[in-house]
Image (spheres, rainbow, N blue to C red):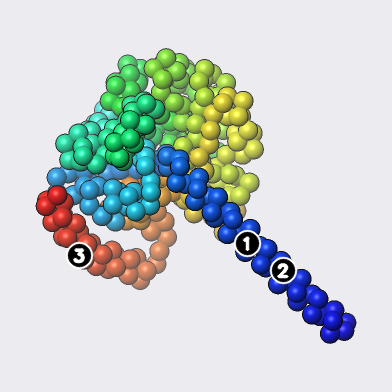
């Protein structure tokens, strides 16, 4: 190849790079314009009641990835705060314990929006509430219920949770509930032949009657497909992944991804690393963090240390993590609490 040909290839390559950069720049401008004119929602943020007290709350810049200072900095308008209870035994005692945990989280959200920070964040119960609060320049909380386990066998609790502000609910989490089989049934076995229980079907009808959205991220594929067929209203998947990209039972295959389209529903893709890309097919499905946006550690979304992959760390790495987290807490939490008291 002669010099002219080489120069021609160099100019061509340079032109492609410049064009790509120009396209990227234009895309960023377009994305920024969209970002500036729409409401920005995160549809799944786990909470912990201990972060909703007078001395420690979301008015402070906590180590949680979602709190008011970070919402303001990131331009985030709406946070779906989650009443989550992990799956436990299907017994009266188990249901009662789960119910108490759920109520504590409902109460925490109301306490924050009504008493601690009503001048900064309001609780929305309708789309009109969201718009009205946004016009007042307030950040907005909406409540979602993850895992129908806390309702026990008392279907009237669906209305109770709705009256407390719950606007979506999933029928199972990791582990089969009294309402639906879980995605974990692929390995652990199902209770309802990869579907819903009779009570689960009644719950969907009650949710439709009240106006509470059916959420799909954790139940089994069979349970989700049955829920979509039964629901008279559009369903959502508040924090789901794509199985073709990460082959874990928690993620949706093509059939599940396409089904909500016919129902009028919508899927929000989770940003949690293990549900976006797996290192190998042998990698186990982890216990989920906070909608893919939770912080690791004890002051995160409330799923516990192991829920963020910390239990896979070596002893040395775990000790390093604990040490650095303690340094962060020591540096920032006292000032944050002091500022909160002043304000």
Question: For this rendering, which residue is in front, 232 or 154?
Answer: 232
Q: Residues within 10 Å of mark 3 (few under 14, many from 20)?
A: few
Instruction: Say whether residue 287 is visible.
Output: no
Disc 2 on helix, strand or loop? helix
Q: Is residue 77 left or right of residue 186?
A: left
- Residue 63 seen in render: yes
Query: What x and y, as percent, mark residue 27?
Result: 58, 54
Residue 67 placement, left or right of 37: left
Q: Position of residue 145 (x, y in %)?
A: 36, 32
Query: Is the residue marked by circle 2 packed among few (<14), some (14-19), or many (20+) residues within 10 Å?
Result: few
Q: Residue furthest bottom?
A: 3
Residue with the mark numbered 2: 15
Q: In the picture shown, does residue 184 fall above or below 33?
A: above
Q: As drawn, is 257 to the left or to the right of 9?
A: left
Name the quarter where the N terminus is drawn: bottom right
Q: Which mark is residue 240?
A: none
Marks 1,2: beta carbons within 8 A:
no
Q: Which residue is under mark 1?
A: 22
- The outermost residue toward the right is 1
| x 72%, y 68%: residue | 15
Q: Nearer the N terminus, badge 1 or badge 3? A: 1
Cα–Cα span, label 1 and label 2: 10 Å
Q: Nearer the viewer, residue 243 or 3?
A: 3
Secondary structure under the numbered disc 3 in the rendered image: helix
Residue beneath disc 3: 330
Please give the name of the residue rendered at 60% of the width and 33% of the height, measured from the top-left corner: 256
Which residue is located at x 12 percent, y 51 percent? Answer: 341
In the displayed structure, would residue 311 be above or below residue 286? below
Ranked by sequence position, the earlier of labels 1 and 2 is: 2
CA separation in Å, label 1 and label 3: 45 Å
* The quarter of the displayed image where residue 126 is located: top left
- Position in image of residue 258 (x %, y %): 63, 33
């Amino acid at each position: 190849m002669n010099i002219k040909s080489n120069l021609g290839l160099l100019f061509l390559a340079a032109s492609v790079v410049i064009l790509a950069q120009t396209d990227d720049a234009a895309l960023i401008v377009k994305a920024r314009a969209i970002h500036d004119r729409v409401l920005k929602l995160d549809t799944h943020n786990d909470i912990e009641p201990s972060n909703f007290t007078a001395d420690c709350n979301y008015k402070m810049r906590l180590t949680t990835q979602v709190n008011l200072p970070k919402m303001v900095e990131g331009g985030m308008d709406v946070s779906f705060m989650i009443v989550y209870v992990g799956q436990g035994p299907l017994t009266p005692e188990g249901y009662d314990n789960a119910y108490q945990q759920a109520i504590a989280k409902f109460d925490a959200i109301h306490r924050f929006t009504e008493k601690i920070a009503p001048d900064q964040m309001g609780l929305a119960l309708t789309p009109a509430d969201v718009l009205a609060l946004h016009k007042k320049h307030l950040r907005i909380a909406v409540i979602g219920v993850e895992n129908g386990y806390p309702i026990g066998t008392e279907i009237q609790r669906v209305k109770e949770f709705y009256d407390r502000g719950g606007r979506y609910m999933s029928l199972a989490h990791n582990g089969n509930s009294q309402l639906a089989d879980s995605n974990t049934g692929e390995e652990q076995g199902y209770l309802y032949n990869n579907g819903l229980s009779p009570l689960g079907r009644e719950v969907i009808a009650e949710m439709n009657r009240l106006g509470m959205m059916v959420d799909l991220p954790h139940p089994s594929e069979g349970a989700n497909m049955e829920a979509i067929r039964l629901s008279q209203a559009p369903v959502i998947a508040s924090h789901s992944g794509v199985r073709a990209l990460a082959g874990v039972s928690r993620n949706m295959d093509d059939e599940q991804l396409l089904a909500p389209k016919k129902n009028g529903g919508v899927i929000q893709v989770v940003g949690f690393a293990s549900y976006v890309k797996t290192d190998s097919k042998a990698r186990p499905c982890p216990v989920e963090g906070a909608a893919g946006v939770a912080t690791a550690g004890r002051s995160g979304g409330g799923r516990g240390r192991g829920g963020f992959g910390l239990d896979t760390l070596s002893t040395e790495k775990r000790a390093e993590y604990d040490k650095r987290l303690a340094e962060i807490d020591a540096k920032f939490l006292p000032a944050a609490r002091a500022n909160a008291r002043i304000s």
